[in-house]
């Protein structure tokens, strides 16, 4: 994947989004742990937002680890009614909006798993694609593990969603690269010593890397962000009416 392709796939226009009259500035700022006072200026400070987003992602992953381990919530984020899936989707959307590509894979994989466990296979497949398009093949071993974990999840998605032939082909590709078929079930996936680096989705056997899922997943993120903005605006208006 070239830098130009990556940028085109993951870079919406921040100015256009932030300039929308219905953009829920205060609520997004709170979601990122920023003071709602002066949020309009804060959200236009890319460096500050990315730092806040990194902290929020770290908090989200820790809270999700607690949830999956059956531990009681230890952070305010875990008490959010949209936690975990909605919060994770919002963080992925923010990471896309502010081009914090390195923050996408871990959270997007958690979201993909949640969607799969909820039976939402199309959304799960879209977030699988988003994990993989955010990883540069062979650049970092932990990112390779996330991409392979997403690939192993895709096998389960396709098996349940009516794509057994493609699922079988991907499963054989996983085996050829010494990747466990259930790697996606690990909260913090790591690769076996004898596994091979992530290949970017270039399957053997004539299967194309993606079925245009890059654009699909990108649009899904934007669709969700638009929905989130509308929901936040309604909730904010309701809160103000109740004051």
Image (cartoon, rainbow, N blue to C red):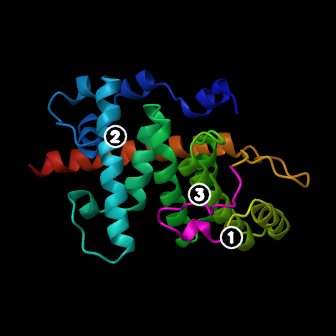
Left-right relation of 80 to 175: left
Please name the residue that numbered disc 3 is placed on: 123
Image disc number at residue 181: 1
Mark 1 against mark 3, which lies toward the viewer? 1
User: Residue 169 magenta-drawn?
Assistant: no
Q: Mark 1 against mark 2, which lies toward the viewer? A: 1
In percent of width and height, residue 119 lies at: 58, 71
> Outermost residue toward the left?
243
> Mark 1 and mark 2: span between their CA atoms?
32 Å
Which numbered circle lies on residue 52?
A: none
Q: Nearer the viewer, residue 226 or 77?
A: 77
What residue lies at 65% left-to-right and 45% top-to-bottom? 216
Which region of the structure is painted magenta?
A: 180-197
In the rendering, at what x and y percent does residue 186 appear? 52, 68
Q: How far apart, in angstroms, are the residues tagged by discs 1 and 3?
A: 20 Å
Residue 240, quarter of the rendered image: top left
In front of the other: label 3 or label 2? 2
What is the secondary structure assignment of the residue under circle 1?
A: loop
Residue on which disc 2 sits: 53
Give the answer, above or below, for where 153 lies relative to 128: below
Identify the residue at image location x=91%, y=51%. Answer: 206
Extreme-right residue of the structure: 206
Mark 3 lies on a secondary structure that is helix
What is the crowding at mark 2: few (fewer than 14 residues within 10 Å), some, or many (at least 20)?
many
Q: Residue at x 48, y 60 (%)?
A: 110
- Left or right, 224 with respect to 76, comes to right
Pointer 1 with pointer 2, Cβ within 8 A: no
Please tell me which of labels 1 and 3 falls first in the chain. Answer: 3
Q: Is residue 124 visible?
A: yes
In primary-sequence order, the first of circles 3 and 2 is 2
């Amino acid at each position: 994947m070239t830098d130009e392709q990556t940028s085109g796939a993951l870079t919406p226009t921040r100015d256009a989004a932030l300039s929308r009259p219905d953009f829920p500035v205060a609520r997004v700022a709170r979601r990122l742990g920023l003071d709602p006072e002066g949020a309009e200026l804060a959200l236009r400070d890319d460096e500050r937002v990315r730092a806040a987003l990194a902290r929020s992602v770290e908090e989200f992953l820790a809270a999700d680890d607690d949830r999956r381990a059956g531990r009681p919530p230890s952070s305010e984020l875990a008490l959010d009614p949209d936690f975990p899936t909605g919060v994770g989707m919002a963080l992925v959307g923010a990471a896309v909006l502010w081009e914090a590509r390195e923050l996408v894979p871990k959270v997007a994989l958690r979201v993909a798993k949640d969607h799969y466990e909820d039976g939402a296979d199309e959304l799960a497949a879209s977030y699988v694609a988003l994990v993989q398009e955010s990883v540069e093949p062979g650049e970092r071993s932990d990112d390779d593990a996330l991409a392979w974990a997403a690939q192993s999840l895709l096998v389960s998605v396709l098996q349940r969603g009516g794509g057994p032939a493609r699922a079988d082909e991907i499963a054989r590709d996983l085996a050829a690269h010494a990747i466990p078929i259930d790697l996606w079930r690990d909260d913090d996936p790591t690769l076996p010593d004898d596994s091979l680096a992530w290949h970017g989705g270039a399957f053997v056997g004539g299967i194309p890397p993606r079925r245009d899922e890059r654009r699909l997943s990108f649009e899904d993120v934007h669709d969700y962000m638009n929905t989130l903005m509308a929901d936040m605006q309604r909730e904010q208006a309701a809160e103000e009416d109740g004051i």
